[in-house]
Image: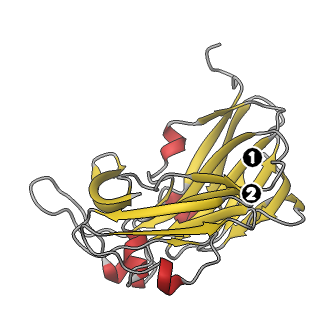
């Protein structure tokens, strides 16, 4: 991966000076199978030190997660031993600053033999804490005081406020659906809920025996979960963090199952 500082549109007309992996927020999703060796290189093209912390790795952090100075790089390997939905993020101090600025993503580790067939989507929840617009282009940066007070301006799925409310995710009704949810934070719990559905199975961190028949599950900051469900019929099914102050700030989306009533065929 390559670190880069880029302009990122969090909401229409709201442009943020983001710190990124591979110029996107969140960073690219990585998917491997348990037992695979991950050979990772981080190249820092940004103006300040950055690093990488993989929650899926069992490795000495002082060796692998060291700060990488501008125009330098680090390379390390690890075996992804435990299946699950894991966060990765920049681990350079202050860590909350680097995460709040956009340096995070998801690493999925499938069990050997895979998972049961399902349509799959990845959702990374996170927050933005913004200064007032600055300069002629009204660029916004991070407000450290808001970060410390856990008072975000936006709570988002996959980097954009209400991204899937305005552009719903098309899914098939009556067919298995799997949502990989990672909560990057840096501060707010994700009370993940799909309106009109009950989760058939929830895998906490994505491994072990599932919980069954749940309506809502809290995904902690720095954690992940896998939600298996089936939507009963055609229609629009909102998904939210059920902490509604956060949903109101953009932590909401919609699954469009089949052809909902009133839509063109």
Q: Is 206 on the left or on the right of 116, as rendered?
A: left
Q: Position of residue 121 (x, y in %)?
A: 65, 44
Taking depth in this image into account, of 175 and 154 the one nearest to the observer is 175
Residue lying farthest to the left in this orientation: 136
Horizontally, is 98 left or right of 201 in the view? left
Mark 1: secondary structure: strand
Residue drawn 50% across the image and 52% down it: 158
The quarter of the displayed image where residue 3 is located: bottom left
Residue placed at 59% from the left, 74% from the top?
221
Query: Residue at image x 65%, y 77%?
Result: 58
User: Residue 8's spot in the image, x, y percent?
Assistant: 32, 52
Nearer-the-camera pick, 59 or 20: 59
Is disc 2 placed on a helix, strand or loop? strand
Residue at position x 41%, y 85% in the image: 148
- Position of the N terminus by quadrant: bottom left
Please give the label number shown on residue 125.
Answer: none
User: Distance of mark 2 from mark 1, alpha carbons?
Assistant: 7 Å
Q: 73 above or below 168? A: below
Residue 154 in view of the camera: no
Residue 92: percent from left, percent from top: 39, 80
Q: Is residue 159 above or below residue 246?
A: above
Q: Residues within 10 Å of mark 1 (few under 14, many from 20)?
A: many
Placement of the C terminus among the 4 image quadrants: top right
| Residue 126 at least partly seen | yes
Q: Residue 256 location, x and y as percent?
A: 65, 33
Residue with the mark numbered 1:
178
Q: How is the image coloured?
A: secondary structure
Q: Earlier in the sequence, mark 2 or mark 1?
A: 1
Residue contact at pointers 2 and 1, CB within 8 angstroms: yes
* Quarter of the figure with residue 183: bottom right
Circle 2 packing at 10 Å, graded few (<14), some (14-19), many (20+), is: many
Disc assigned to residue 226: 2
């Amino acid at each position: 991966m390559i670190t880069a500082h880029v302009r990122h549109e969090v909401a229409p007309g709201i442009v943020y000076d983001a710190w990124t992996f591979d110029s996107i927020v969140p960073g690219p999703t990585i998917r491997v199978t348990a037992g695979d060796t991950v050979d990772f290189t981080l190249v820092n093209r940004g103006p300040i030190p950055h690093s990488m912390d993989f929650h899926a790795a069992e490795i000495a952090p002082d060796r692998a997660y060291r700060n990488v100075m501008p125009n330098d790089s680090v390379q390390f390997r690890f075996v992804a031993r435990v299946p699950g939905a894991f966060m990765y993020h920049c681990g350079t101090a202050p860590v909350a600053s680097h995460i709040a600025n956009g340096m995070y993503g998801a690493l999925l580790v499938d069990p050997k033999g895979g998972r049961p067939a399902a349509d799959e989507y990845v959702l990374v929840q996170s927050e933005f804490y913004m200064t007032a617009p600055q300069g002629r282009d009204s660029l916004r940066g991070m407000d450290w005081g808001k970060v410390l007070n856990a008072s975000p301006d936006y709570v988002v799925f996959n980097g954009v406020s209400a991204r899937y409310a305005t552009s719903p995710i098309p899914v098939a009704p009556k067919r298995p659906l799997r949502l990989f949810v990672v909560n990057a934070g840096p501060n707010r719990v994700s009370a993940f809920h799909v309106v009109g559905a009950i989760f058939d199975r929830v895998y906490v961190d994505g491994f072990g025996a599932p919980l069954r028949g749940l309506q809502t599950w809290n995904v902690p900051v720095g954690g992940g979960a896998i939600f298996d469900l089936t939507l009963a019929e055609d229609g629009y099914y909102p998904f939210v963090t059920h902490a509604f102050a956060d949903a109101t700030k953009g932590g909401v989306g919609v699954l469009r199952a089949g052809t909902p009533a009133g839509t063109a065929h």
